[in-house]
Image (tube, rainbow, N blue to C red):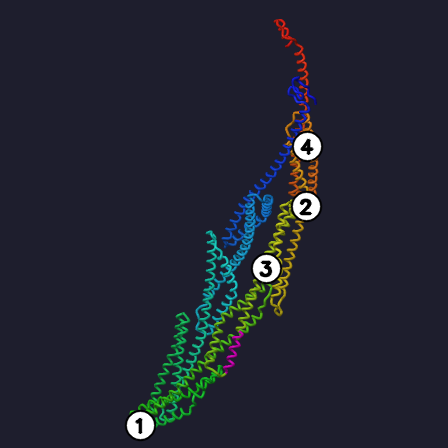
Amino acid sequence: MGVPQINGSAGPSSLNGIHTCKDLTELQVTISDVNARYDALGSELKERLSRQQASLELRQKARQSIEVLRSWLSDREQSLKQGQTTSPSKPEVVRAQTQQNKVLLSELAEHSGKVEELKSTLRKLIADNPDSPEADAWRQQLQEIDSRWQTANQTAAQRQAELETCADRLGSFASAANQLGPWLREKELMMSVLGPLSIDSNMLNTQKQQVQFMLREFDTRRPQFDQFTQSAEGILSQTGDSAQDAKDLEEVRTELGSISQQWEDLTGRLTQRSSHIDQAQGTSERYQSLLKELSSSIASLSERLDAQASLSAQPEALKRRLQETGEIRSELERRRTELVEAERLCRELSAIVAEPYLKEELSKRLENINGPLRSLEERAADGLTQLQAALSSTQQFQQMFEELRSWMDRQSDPKESPSDSLPCRPEAIRSLLAHTEELQRRIASQRGSYELIQAEGVSLLATLPSDERSALQSRLASLRQDWEGLNHRIMERETRLKSTLSKAETYQQHRAELTPWLAECEEKDGEIRPSLDPSVLDESLQKARALSLDLERRQALLEAFNTAADQLLEQCCIGEEELRDEKAQLNRRVDRLSEGLLNRTSQLEELSSRLKEFEEGRQAVERRLEAATHQIEVQEALGPQACSAKSLERLRSQQESLMSLQPQVVYLRDLAQGLVQDAPQTPGGSTEGAQRLQEQAKETEKEYDKVTDKIEQCCSSLESRLQGVGEVQAHVRDVFSRLADLDDELDSLSPVGRDADCLASQADAVKSFLSRLSNLRTELDGHATECTSMLRREGSSPDLLALRRETEALSRQAGKLSERGQARLVQIEDAADRVQDFYRLVAELQGMLGRAEEGLNSQGAVGTEVEMIKQQLLEFK
């Protein structure tokens, strides 16, 4: 486009300062190059600004997420810390805390996606900015978040297990307390009506049976009491900080102390009563037997004294009377010795029974024997005095002396049966004792003659000369020595035989009591069979513990049996080997039973522990599987609403949790197989427990595989559904990016030009922009249509709804951008029209200026006259 020259004085390339086309073109090229470089620099700076803004937003998002997560984790950690420092002692508190902990576990599961997203963000920041000064801080934050997150999850899971254990303890404690409390009060009431110990042996047997029955009841309740104690100790092992926790723990401690004190008090009183009954039973039997024997003997002796004839002048009659009186006196002396033993037994019984009226009854019974015995002793002494007076002649004295000496010489010497040849059996000892008692009776029949001879001899010593007196003294002394020696040996042998008989009877009594009990225990031990059925195993374990407790309680009886056997062996030698064999055999049976019970109990406890471990592990796995199944059911119930990346993230988290559960499932399977293999095979034993255990392990593994496959199917299905959504999302994001570029391009356009070429170029650029924007809007409409069809086909999932909203927002943004582009085009076209009008006016002005110059140049010189000058001025105007 040419521009006419205005002033002739202008250079060749310009007219009055207005550039020519050549100069204008060079200037436009330079300006265009500068503008292009400026635009490139602006685009690069904008791209860099966009990246920096994106990085800044990512950092700010990470920082905000870290702060939010730290705050959230701090609250949960504080809650977990407070929970770990307390152990609730009320069932309702445990239930509340268990529910709170479950909510916390649910919150942790829900936040796992956010935590993984934050960790991914930090890893991306570290990977994108490895040399950044904040990289070390990001790594520390990543490590801190990972550590605190794992710790919180582990602590919550551990707390859940502790709460479940605490709930079991509280339930067991409350159940046992509710059962033991009334039962102990009932036993206390029964104890109060048992009454005082009787002095009658038959009544003592009845009281013994009552005590043994109650002790067996306590043995039956012993496992429940032990479980109650263990549960209480488990509850009290945790300390609470709050006043309410301290109060609740004090209630548990009080309940434990009350029931334990009642238990120990009642068992102690029953054991003491049983011991007192045992003591009183033996003592009462001996006391009553001795009193009965004394009463019968006193009656018999009284009849014999009453039946004696009056004094006769015949020596033979006097001798028979003297012999009978001597026997009666010897018998009375033995009864006096037995009465002393009865007095000792009376004192022992009086010490055992506490009631005054029973002590008075015992003393009264003893006095009923002591009085008649004393009367008989006085009557026998009076009769002997009368006989001594009747037999006063020397001839009779000599005859009696010789007869007594001859009788003593004829008696067999007791030393012929030495003490070391005593038998061990009570029957043989009783036979020897009967022989000794018969010898005693024969000696007693001569006692009157002996005492009369001694008394008469003393009387004769005063009347004899010295030489005869010495001989008589010597004979009397020899007679006295032989008489006392014979009596001493007989008494010593009788005492030894009675002592041996008592020990043999004690041995036989203990043996008779131990043998059936041991046979019964061996039979019960044979009935204890290990089983993999929890109820049968628990019953067997309780039987084994009760049998061990019974064995421990009978240990005192076994020691008494061994002591009696040792004492019997010290005094006997006939049948010694047989006695030793009996003792050794019974002790071997007890030791074998004790060792077998110990091994059996240990085996049952180990089996019970492993079975409990299996059951707890199986229940834990089932709870995890139930949680996963519940999540799958929720996923299926939500339908299209669950089709979201968050749902997929939760499912993947649950899938990872199930994968971490696989070692435990394998361990349960191996544990079940090990239990089945290690369980002892007993003849006739049932295999139901083993089958049930294997079925439970297989069922758990099958359920685990089923849930794992199902959650894998859910994840795959959700991924396939989200893949289509993801593709559309990728296209939409690409459209968003291109739309953002178009927006940046529109914003980066230079201001409207002032020359036609620039305006034409700008108009072409805007038209090209509008064309590309139209194509982008068409593509966006296609994506919106595809999204709508997916919504109709798959339902209104959150991601699809969000995608539709995003496409609608982009459509509105594209519409606004199109409006701005149209407005820009209108602005450029309007500017082009004004520039065209401007150049038209400039051309007209230049023509007018040319004509004015021509008119100016055509005027002559200024006149010299006024009229001329006025005329020229008018023309010039």
Looking at the image, can residue 814 be seen? yes
Q: Position of residue 26 (x, y in %)?
A: 67, 27
The region drawn magenta spans 575-589
| Label 1 sits on residue | 468
- Give whichever of discs 3 and 2 has the lower sequence position: 3
Neighbor class of circle 2 (other Cα within 10 Å; few <14, some 14-19, many 20+) is some
Where the N terminus falls, by quadrant? Answer: top right
For the residues labelled 3 and 1, the Cα–Cα distance comes to: 107 Å
Q: Label 1's element?
A: helix
Label 4 close to label 3 by CB (< 8 Å): no
Q: Disc 2 or 1, which lies upstream in sequence? A: 1
Dot label at residue 615: 3
- In three-dimensional space, the C-alpha distance between marks 2 and 1, rounded to whole angstroms, equals 147 Å
Residue for point 40% across, 78% down: 341
Q: Amino acid at mark 3?
A: Glu
Give the left or right position of residue 857, taking residue 462 as reference.
Answer: right
Q: Which residue is mark 2?
A: 721
- Mark 4, residue position: 769
Q: Residues within 10 Å of mark 3 (few under 14, many from 20)?
A: some
Labels 3, 2: front one: 2
In the figure, 588 relative to 46: above or below?
below
Which one is in front in this view, the residue at disc 4 or the one at disc 3? 4
Do the residues under discs 3 and 1 have CB atoms within 8 angstroms?
no
| Front disc: 2 or 4 | 4
Counting residues from the start of the chain, the first of labels 1 and 4 encountered is 1
- Residue 852 pos. (x, y %): 66, 13
Seen at 64% across and 63% down, the residue is 691
First in residue order: circle 3 vs circle 1: 1
> Relative to 346, is 523 on the left or the right?
right
The alpha-carbon separation of the residues under discs 2 and 4 comes to 36 Å
